[in-house]
Amino acid sequence: MSMPPPPSSAELNHWIERFQRGELSAAALLAELTRAQTANLEHTQVDLDRQRRCGYPEVVYSPGKSDWALIQIAEALLAQRQRVLMTRITPEQAAAVTAAFPAARHNAVGRTLRIDPGATLESTGENNNATGRVCVVTAGTTDLPVAEEARDTAAWMGCETTLFSDIGVAGPQRLISRLADIQTADAVVVAAGMEGALPSVVGGYVRCPVIAVPTSVGYGAAFGGLAALLGMLNSCAANVTVVNIDAGFKAGYIAGLIARRSL
């Protein structure tokens, strides 16, 4: 798929100035502003201008999309030299996309897939030019899928990421032994189910924002993550904020924005 690049800031200013001088009609200006900003695929309208507006490309939510749709979306983004991130991707979908793009990296635990247009991702899947540091912490190993989704999202955004797993409040010595590393982060993501206590504890030890992710882990009264969500929303740690249940992508994205802007 060959597509022209989105208009540059200079081009946008040029069109607006022509409109102000009366050399361009409102309809013509609108046509220019929308030119090449969207890939109008058979099944999807890919926002190619999001990287310019928001700093990062559109992220692909994979459920409900065919293998061919995912491949076409990746082609549209890569044609504009934009990094690809697909979330909640199934092993079958990932296999199809990887067959089309051998440089793709599939995180089976986090259910994510990344493709770099310059093929600069090393075998570790990390960005060698990372800026900003995000620590991802889980209360238990059952929280790993959500935590890995958050970690991979922050790495896709260009952050250095570190994962600390299974250091919940049932064994507080495990958290204490990791504090020196966690305290160097620009943002911390904490994924926890059950009663959701860990983010408040972490928040009391660090000077950076803590993004709490309630996970749908726990017995009946956990109500599929609702108990953890309510506990986190009621955190007495002033630096804790909360995203939706199992929303690893959202937590990783917010953490990435904070980490990148902290420099």
Image (tube, helix red, strand yellow):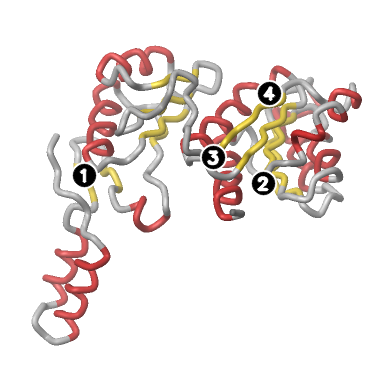
Answer left or right for 98 relative to 43: right
Answer left or right for 244 relative to 249: right
Mark 4 packing: few (<14 Cα in 10 Å), some, or many (20+)?
A: many
Which numbered disc, 1 or 3, marks the residue that appears first in the sequence?
1
- Three-letter amino acid code at the position of disc 3: Cys
Q: Which SS class for mark 1?
A: strand
Task: Identify whether 238 is placed above or below 74.
Answer: below
Mark 1 packing: few (<14 Cα in 10 Å), some, or many (20+)?
A: some
* Disc assigned to residue 143: 4
- Give x and y (percent) for residue 178: 80, 29
The residue pinned by badge 2 equals 186
**Distance of label 4 from label 2 (alpha carbons):** 22 Å
The residue pinned by badge 1 equals 39
**Distance of label 2 from label 1 (alpha carbons):** 35 Å
- Give x and y (percent) for residue 92: 38, 12
**Distance of label 1 from label 4 (alpha carbons):** 36 Å
The residue pinned by badge 3 equals 159
